[in-house]
């Protein structure tokens, strides 16, 4: 089992994603790290673990959703659709 799935099998999955979103907001992130982070989010949101997917969307992507955020250009599929829907709602 992957470490992410192990973390998300507990009650704090959303807390982990929220903490990560605050971390990348509060710290300088290298430009080449955004595509790597997006790849993880793309796989998580499209994956079979719906608890992890929901946490990634509601506790990470929502916190960063902004049309000019550097993460946006590397998102794909469900993760990008969620981001765009939240942009429109926010």
Image (spheres, rainbow, N blue to C red):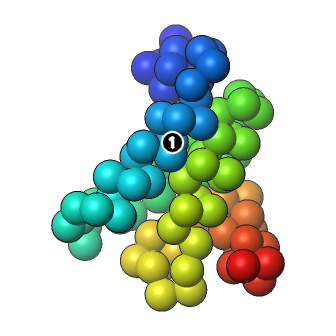
Residue at 58% over, 72% down: 65
Total count of labels: 1
Percent across and percent down for residue 54 are 72, 42
For residue 52, which quarter of the picture?
top right
Between residues 10 and 31, which one lies in front from this camera angle?
Answer: 10
Q: Is residue 4 above or below residue 17?
A: above
Q: Quadrant for residue 26, please give it.
A: bottom left
> Circle 1 is placed at which residue position?
17
Please give left or right for residue 52 compared with residue 19 in the image. right
Q: Nearer the viewer, residue 28 or 1?
A: 28
Q: Is residue 28 above or below residue 2?
A: below
x, y percent for residue 81: 74, 68
The reply, left or right, for residue 25 in relation to residue 41 is left
Q: Is residue 75 visible?
A: yes
The percent coordinates of residue 72 (x first, y second) are 52, 74
Residue 43 or 28: which is nearer the viewer? 28
**Quadrant containing the C terminus in the rendered view:** bottom right
Residue drawn at (66%, 52%) of the image: 57
Q: Residue at x 67, y 51 (%)?
A: 58
Query: What is the secondary structure assignment of the residue under circle 1?
Result: helix
Q: Residues within 10 Å of mark 1 (few under 14, many from 20)?
A: many
Q: Which residue is located at x 32 percent, y 52 percent? A: 23
Q: Is residue 89 above or below residue 5?
A: below
x then y, percent, for residue 83: 66, 69
Question: Can see residue 77?
Answer: no
Residue 54 vs 69, above or below: the answer is above
């Amino acid at each position: 089992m992957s470490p992410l799935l192990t973390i998300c099998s507990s009650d704090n999955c959303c807390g982990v994603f929220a903490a990560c979103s605050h971390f990348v907001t509060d710290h300088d992130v290298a430009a080449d790290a955004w595509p790597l982070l997006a790849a993880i989010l793309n796989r998580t949101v499209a994956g079979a673990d719906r608890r992890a997917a929901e946490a990634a969307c509601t506790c990470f992507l929502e916190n960063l959703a902004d049309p000019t955020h550097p993460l946006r250009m590397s998102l794909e599929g469900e993760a990008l659709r969620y981001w765009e829907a939240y942009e429109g709602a926010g």
